[in-house]
Image: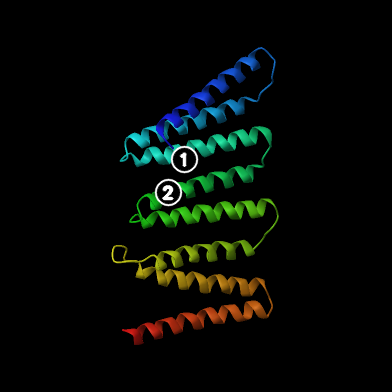
């Protein structure tokens, strides 16, 4: 997006905010105060994006822009639709996770950002699943451990000469095995009884093949 269009968008949002505030003061429209806070955060996010475009090295400005923009959108939505506290926690976990992902996308050498980013996204998802009663009890531990194991599997897949991430295979296998162990305790059936030993067998086969490859 060209900078002049960004200026126009920010200007239009500011003008509309002033018009809505004027109508609210004259009791033509009754607007929730949260709406104005949401618009203010969106404008603030747009300003940070503008500064980021001018100074490419100011990466923190982009992260702040994303945070304030998403916070503004959430506040506006919450002003129209009342959301449970669990979903508010989910939102903030996802925002923090996305900020870490942006760090990695902006510079793929910052692979460490994938770990906290993935953990926050998983935690937010677990809170949302529990809030809507889609998953409850010990199955959430399986979702947590298997989700973190997928993060390490992803790190293992993106390893290269710059990112020496061969070590991630060990926590990936360990978390996968442990998550299937929990699943076998929860699901007292043949599926759980098969997945847990198969994960152990796969781990052993990998290390045998790795030895012969050397």
Residue 137 location, x and y as percent? 66, 61
Residue 145 location, x and y as percent? 53, 64
Q: Which mark is residue 102?
A: 2
Which image quadrant for residue 83?
top right
Which image quadrant for residue 184?
bottom right
Which image quadrant for residue 15?
top right
Which residue in the structure is indicated by mark 1?
66
Q: Is residue 162 left or right of residue 198?
A: left
Residue that appears at 49% across and 65% down: 150
Q: CB under 8 Å between callouts 1 and 2?
A: yes
Decide which of tag 1 and tag 2 comes sooner along the chain: 1
Secondary element at image label 2: helix
Q: Which mark is residue 1?
A: none
Q: Is residue 13 above or below residue 180?
A: above
Outermost residue to the left: 161
Closer to the camera in the image, 61 or 52: 52
Q: Is residue 60 above or below residue 40?
A: below
Residue that appears at 58% across and 25% down: 36
Quadrant containing the N terminus is: top left
Residue that appears at 45% across and 83% down: 204
Residue that appears at 44% across and 27% down: 7
Residue 105 location, x and y as percent? 40, 52
In three-dimensional space, the C-alpha distance between marks 1 and 2, rounded to whole angstroms, equals 9 Å
Residue 138 location, x and y as percent? 63, 64
Secondary element at image label 1: helix
Outermost residue to the top: 26
């Amino acid at each position: 997006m060209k900078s002049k269009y960004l200026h126009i968008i920010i200007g239009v949002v500011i003008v509309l905010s002033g018009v809505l505030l004027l109508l609210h003061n004259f009791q033509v429209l009754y607007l929730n105060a949260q709406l104005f806070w949401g618009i203010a955060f969106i404008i603030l996010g747009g300003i940070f994006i503008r500064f980021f475009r001018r100074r490419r090295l100011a990466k923190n400005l982009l992260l702040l822009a994303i945070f304030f923009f998403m916070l503004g959108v959430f506040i506006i939505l919450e002003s129209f639709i009342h959301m449970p506290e669990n979903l508010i926690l989910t939102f903030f976990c996802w925002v923090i996770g996305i900020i870490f992902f942006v760090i990695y996308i902006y510079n793929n050498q910052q692979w460490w950002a994938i770990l906290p980013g993935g953990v926050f996204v998983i935690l937010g998802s677990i809170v949302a699943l529990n809030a809507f009663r889609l998953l409850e009890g010990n199955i959430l531990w399986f979702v947590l451990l298997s989700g973190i194991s997928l993060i390490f599997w992803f790190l293992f897949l993106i390893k290269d000469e710059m990112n020496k991430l061969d070590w991630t295979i060990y926590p990936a296998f360990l978390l996968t095995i442990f998550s299937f162990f929990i699943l076998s305790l929860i699901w007292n059936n043949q599926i759980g009884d098969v997945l847990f030993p198969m994960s152990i067998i796969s781990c052993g086969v990998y290390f045998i093949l790795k030895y012969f490859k050397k």
